[in-house]
Image (spheres, rainbow, N blue to C red):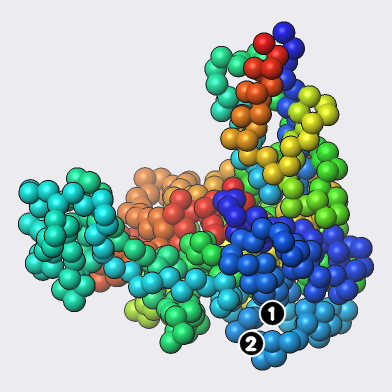
Amino acid sequence: MLNGSTFIRRELMIRIVRAFDDGTLEKELDQIPIKLRPKNSVASGCCVYHDRAIFKYRLMALLGVSVEDETDEAKSLAAYYAEKAWGGGANDTRPKTPLSVCGPACSGCPDAKVVSTPNCRGCIARPCVYNCPKKAISIVGGQSVIDQSLCIKCGKCITACPYHAIVKTSVPCEDACPVGAIRKNDQGVAEIDFEKCIFCGKCFAACPFAAVMERSQLVDVLAAMKRGEKLVAMIAPAAEKQFPGKIEQLLSACAKAGFADVMEVALGAEKTTEHETAEFIERMEKDQKTFMTTSCCPAWVNLVGKHMPDLVNHVSLTPSPMVYAHEIAKKKDPSAKTVFIGPCVAKRSEARRKDVDYVLSFEELGAILAGRKIDVIACEPWPVERPANPTARNYARSCGVTDAVLAEATAKIPGFKLDAKQINGIDRKTCAMVKLYAAGKLPVNFLEVMACPGGCLNGPCSLT
Amino acid sequence: MEKVKVEICCGTACYLLGAANMMDLEDQLPAEWRGRVEVEARTCLELCEKENLGGAPYVRINDTEIMAQATPEKLTARIGELLTEAE
């Protein structure tokens, strides 16, 4: 979604691509913050100097550097750039922790609490007082007052008040995190506990100050292209409606931008469907009472691995569409390097596990196209050998995997029944639901889990 | 009566920086303006060069007037002004 913070991130990305292509990136990097916020210009934050400091950290993240690892504040962006030795290509550029918090950007939002506002009319019905289960509300001088030592933030008073006079303040990143991995530290600045983090990207999308940043491989990809590496752009099925024009036109645009070959990840999804269905049938033959859960959403796989050890054996062992797409590309040309392009933060962690070389977000791909003046609608459709199966393209939607597996299984075994359930978006409530399925308290034999509500189409790095 | 011509830059830079929100501008305009406003999507108008990137998305109105940082709201207001002037 476009807003003030995504605007600045995209602007910085496009500037990086243009400067890289002009051969002036190293020289320009440290000037970008000043060019964007010259003195006497209007600041987004408290002043232009604060804005510039934050831009420096954003540029660091775009260079793939973790802000958490900063030891020398005086170190220039040019020095980071030079240190990463883009020319070599020997270093593994895939970040271990794809997210990074920009401390100076974090607003240190006050702890969540339920408070009464001056909208209170001091009415005589006092539904807030009567509905509070903890007797935390009293009326003082004609205004409701909430005793914070008693309040349990249940929100009953909020719904009861006809004047909308009671509100809950929030810490968006903490509210969005399904696993309690982001918390404010002693200094009141958000910090991610990477032992717990599943890289779902919800904090990244939720923070109104854009303090949570992705560690990018954008410059690594640009440098690899310049070195002449044969990069294969693997476009995720969620690409639908991200850019104007058709998927085939987007493939052409990627080829024009310098990718040696292009393909749809949906071709990999076809293989996932085939193998996952076979695996499911086999599991059911062994044990009718068990259940299997999907493995294509990397945030879900991370969630199980880090927080739900009892479920590990239930996760399908079938590789994700990205991994199959990578195999297809490598089979076609073993010397090629693969670049997954999608709307997902967690894919960066999966790519590291599964040897996919690079991951770009749709935003980063957009920046490359913008920097190289490639308009998707002006491109001729790419001559694909065959378009991917519609059920495979549908993987980006919630229920897509279920539909694909059901169709495949029914074709093999007429009258095949699937007791499928979907977790459409991971949050604290749905995590509790998953535990009920795992404990056998709710009937299911095929559990599809997508970390993002609606599926990958609404991924944290989607463009629209 | 003369029409107001609106050309929305759909170059990838403008698209990323806000033009995506204006793709359905025609549907957002008041019904009584129908037939008096001509909205067209254009490939890159080449206005975002060098330091002017922050001005995206760009829109060109009546061949000469350039609107930077265009939004559906700003555009609708300007089209309204031009239509009133024309009356």
- Quick one: label 1, few (<14), some, or many (20+) residues within 10 Å? many
- Eyeballing the image, is B66 above or below A318? above
Q: Where is residue A269, by image quadrant?
A: bottom right
Q: Residue furthest bottom?
A: A71
Residue A43 location, x and y as percent?
A: 64, 61
- Would residue A458 be seen by someone viewing this image from the given angle? yes
Q: Which amino acid does label 2 sit on?
A: Asp
Q: Is residue A434 visible?
A: no
Letter of the chain that mark 2 sits on in the rendering = A
What chain does mark 1 sit on?
A
Q: Say the numbered circle drawn on residue A65.
A: 1
Residue B53 x, y percent position in the rendering: 78, 52
Residue type marked 1: Val
- Give the SS element for disc 2: helix
Whole-percent x, y for residue A78 in the image: 82, 79
Instruction: Give the quarter of the image for residue A447.
Output: bottom left
Q: Residue at x 72, y 20 (%)?
A: B4
Picture layout, residue B41 above or below residue A223: above
Are circles 1 and 2 on residues that touch, CB within 8 Å? yes
Q: Indicate which disc residue A19 carries.
A: none
Q: Which residue is drawn at 83% across and 26% down?
A: B63
B56 to the left or right of A442? right
Query: Can you identify the residue that label 2 sits on?
Result: A69
Residue at 76%, 28% (x, y): give it: B61
In x, y percent, where is residue A431? 34, 67
